[in-house]
Image (cartoon, rainbow, N blue to C red):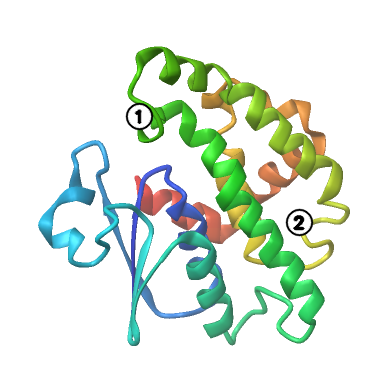
């Protein structure tokens, strides 16, 4: 049995959706970041970083969304969530997920957690002011260079899709209109109709 620790609206949503798609046995623990659950001693024994997601497996604990998504896809046998037999396609998938983690998520985080990178109020305000511009640039790149088919990787649904869906859900709060990106907006709308996505959103509350 896998146990995923996530939080409402967090990047852990991508891993939650992937688990719902996977056919694997799992349970989800939704923690309250606003209440500081991620800093509780009990949680820090699971993930000393004090962040979500974290996945308890029979082999140990995994953190970081790209790693957790890859593990879920590797373990899933009922469905194919990544191109396991095509090294280039698999690397391309990992490249997309790495971009989401290292660039898109960071651009978003400068709006809410700018204090991670600066202390001066002027510096924090400057970073926050750039969020909409940076997120727009990120999603323009995705709109232009991905989604040439129904899904991120083309015709096949993969672990990249719940990851993009999760980030797309942050656009409105970042001051970006998803309608400016027709392919991404269509992807987001279709994702919301998937039963696995509906189950994950319902579980978050």
Mark 2 touches mark 1? (CB < 8 Å)? no
Left or right placement of residue 204 versus residue 143 in this view:
left
The quadrant of the image that shows the N terminus is bottom left
**Location of mark 1 (residue):** 115
Badge number at residue 152: 2
Question: Which is closer to the viewer, label 2 or label 1?
Answer: 1
Dot 2 alpha-carbon crowd within 10 angstroms: few under 14, some 14 to 19, many 20 or more: many
**Image x and y of residue 104, in percent:** 60, 42
Badge number at residue 48: none
Element type at mark 2: loop
The quadrant of the image that shows the C terminus is top left
Toward the top, the furthest residue is 122
**Image x and y of residue 6, in percent:** 35, 55
Could one spot residue 193 in this view of the protein?
A: no
Q: Up-down: is 1 above or below 117? A: below
**Image x and y of residue 140, in percent:** 78, 35
Q: Residue at x 54, y 16 (%)?
A: 129
Left or right placement of residue 151 versus residue 66 in this view:
right
Dot 1 alpha-carbon crowd within 10 angstroms: few under 14, some 14 to 19, many 20 or more: some
Between residues 148 and 107, which one lies in front from this camera angle? 107
Q: Residue at x 19, y 60 (%)?
A: 44
Could one spot residue 57 in this view of the protein?
A: yes
Sooner in the amino-acid sequence: mark 2 or mark 1 = 1
Q: Residue at x 70, y 48 (%)?
A: 190
Between residues 154 and 98, which one lies in front from this camera angle? 98
Between residues 88 and 24, which one lies in front from this camera angle? 88
């Amino acid at each position: 049995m896998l146990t995923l620790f996530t939080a409402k609206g967090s990047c852990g949503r991508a891993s939650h959706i992937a688990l719902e798609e996977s056919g694997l046995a799992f349970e989800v623990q939704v923690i309250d970041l606003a209440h500081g659950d991620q800093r509780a001693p009990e949680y820090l024994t699971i993930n000393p970083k004090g962040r979500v997601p974290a996945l308890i497996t029979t082999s140990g604990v995994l953190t970081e969304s790209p790693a957790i998504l890859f593990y879920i896809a590797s373990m899933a046998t009922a469905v194919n969530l990544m191109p396991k037999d095509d090294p280039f396609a698999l690397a391309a998938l990992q490249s997309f997920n790495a971009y989401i983690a290292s660039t898109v998520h960071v651009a978003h985080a400068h709006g809410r957690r700018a204090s991670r990178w600066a202390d001066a109020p002027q510096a924090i305000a400057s970073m926050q002011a750039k969020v909409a511009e940076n997120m727009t640039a990120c999603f323009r790149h995705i709109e232009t260079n991905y989604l040439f088919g129904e899904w991120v990787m083309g015709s096949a649904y993969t672990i990249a899709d719940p990851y993009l869906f999760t980030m797309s859900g942050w656009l409105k709060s970042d001051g970006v209109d998803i309608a400016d990106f027709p392919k991404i907006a269509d992807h987001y709308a279709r994702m919301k109709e998937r039963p696995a996505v509906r189950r994950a959103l319902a579980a978050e509350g």
